[in-house]
Image (cartoon, rainbow, N blue to C red):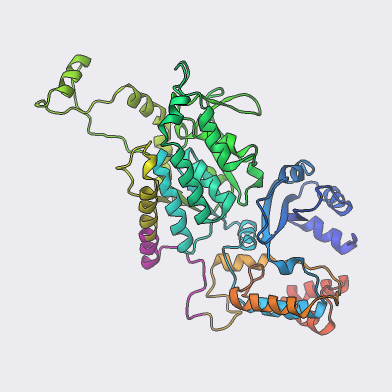
Amino acid sequence: MSFTAWTQRCVRQADCILIVGLADKGTGIGKIEKEVERLTIRTHKELVLLHREGADRPKNTVSWLNNRSWVSTHHHIQCSKRMFIRRSQYRINELYMKVLTSEPLIHTDFSRLARWLTGTSVGLVLGGGGARGAAHVGMIKAIQEAGIPIDMVGGVSIGAFMGALWCAEKNVTTMTQKAREWSKKLTQWWRQLLDLTYPVTSMFSGRDFNQTIFSTFGDTHIEDLWLPYFTVTTDITASSMRVHTHGSLWRYVRSSMTIAGIFPPFCDPRDGHLLVDGCYVNNVPADVMRSHGAKHILAIDVGSQDDTDLTNYGDCLSGWWLLWKRWNPFASPVKVPNLPDIQSRLAYVSCVRQLEEVKNSDYCEYIRPPIDKYKTLQFGSFDEIKEVGYNHGKTYFAGLLKAGLLPIFKPEQGKASHPHESSCYTFTDLAQMVCKVAHNQYIDESDSEEEYEADEEDAQEVGYASEPAVGLSDTEKTSLRRRRVGGSLSLSENELESENEYATKS
């Protein structure tokens, strides 16, 4: 690649520049990349790391980002094997003709990138609620079955844990297994006894709790998750809310799950500030998700519901009177909050107003599964709570779909009579039109016929995920026709200018 006049013009006029790299290669900065940065200092730049399909979890992302301080965000994209196989120009042309007539797959990473670039991302927000967070696993399964893609995830407390699991695995089965194993550890009373400490700051030292979270995530960084992710904590040193999008995953998940009085505040490894549960400031951070660029937001609330029908005991209250009421089997019961209840309600006062704003907002879908009967520490009922969340989600989305209120993410059945009819496709399909993967210009006659035929079979079975199936413009058709006839995958500068003039006139 050389910086021709046309290349420099394109770079200067760009709204966003994608810096694409192979994740398994070196993280150094190339000559072309340095030149792009020199020419476009103020242009928005994003890093796209390509991974082979079925590859292990991303790693070393921090090194990529540290070498590129001008990058505002990054994306991990899994690619099919055909992206890494050299092919002749004729075979690439023939392959792309099949791509253009196949149905797009909205759950792939390329579709996620397209939605991000067009401002139509779908965000999932998972609230806190202790053991009731098992319902998040069932809800995610229901969301997937409803055909709704998940482009970014944010969580608080148990929602931070479950959200991080999904971003790391992107597989409901594996996520369920790891969440179940972790919940089982919290029911082992002997672990709790060994972690007891003198209660100056907290009842437990937190050492065993740290180990359970570390054994789940390992030494992974938030940057190495497949999906964009954030978690929220309460900074009691600065008396503020903190949003974490970088750094050690298990540490910030642990910080967001730190219940005051039960576990000691976690020291932020960056500045030493003391962090506790994010539920105290924002239990369902849909507003934070919106600020991160999500247009469609699903907010799932599993928090506890406080009793409001408390007993009116008058101007004063005697503890001895309450003790008598509790032990006397013939006395009428009274509902009076104890000291921990009062402290908990005071801590959540600021969160209540924010939650009401989320419920009444028009930018998110607020969902609350029927899990009120389960206690905060009832981790032994993981599978039961998970099924409650799944059944509620399945019924909820089925009802929205029947009422016509659920966003459609797939082409309407029976209307796609022609592959280029764009009227029957929604924004997620149209978003794929911006996601064109550029191939290198070379001819490699060493391609085996078996590999080529295997790619054709894959295309017929599952469709192609990286290219659109809709709405080619006349300019694109002319360009594609010239590529097929001339056997070239690129246009000269004069041809590009003539194409631009033609599009302007039409």
Q: In the image, residue 389 lies at what x, y percent?
A: 38, 52
**Above or below for 145 versus 490:** above
Q: In the image, residue 481 lies at what x, y percent?
A: 76, 82
Q: Toward which corner of the image does residue 358 lie, by quadrant?
A: top left
Quarter of the image for the C terminus: give it. bottom right
Q: In the image, residue 170 lies at what x, y percent?
A: 56, 55
- Membership of 181 in magenta stretch: no
Task: Looking at the picture, tell me which residue is in the foreground, 324 or 103.
Answer: 324
Q: Quick check: 353 left or right of 311?
A: right
Task: Identify the residue at image location x=51%, y=27%.
Answer: 206
Pick out the residue farthest to the left. 330
The answer, for residue 336, to whether it is visible in the render is: yes
The answer, for residue 233, to whether it is visible in the render is: no
**Above or below for 232 versus 268:** below
Q: Quick check: 207 left or right of 132?
A: right
- Membership of 405 in magenta stretch: yes
Task: Looking at the picture, tell me which residue is in the foreground, 445 or 469.
Answer: 445
Q: In the image, residue 289 lies at what x, y percent?
A: 54, 46
Report the magenta residues as a range. 395-415
Total marks shown come to 0
**Above or below for 18 versus 486:** above
**Above or below for 301 versus 239:** below
Pick out the residue farthest to the front. 190
Task: Identify the residue at image location x=47%, y=77%.
Answer: 413
Task: Looking at the picture, tell me which residue is in the foreground, 144 or 362.
Answer: 144
Q: Quick check: 33 left or right of 328?
A: right
Task: Looking at the picture, tell me which residue is in the foreground, 162 or 370.
Answer: 162
Task: Identify the residue at image location x=76%, y=42%.
Answer: 63
Quarter of the image for the N terminus: give it. bottom right
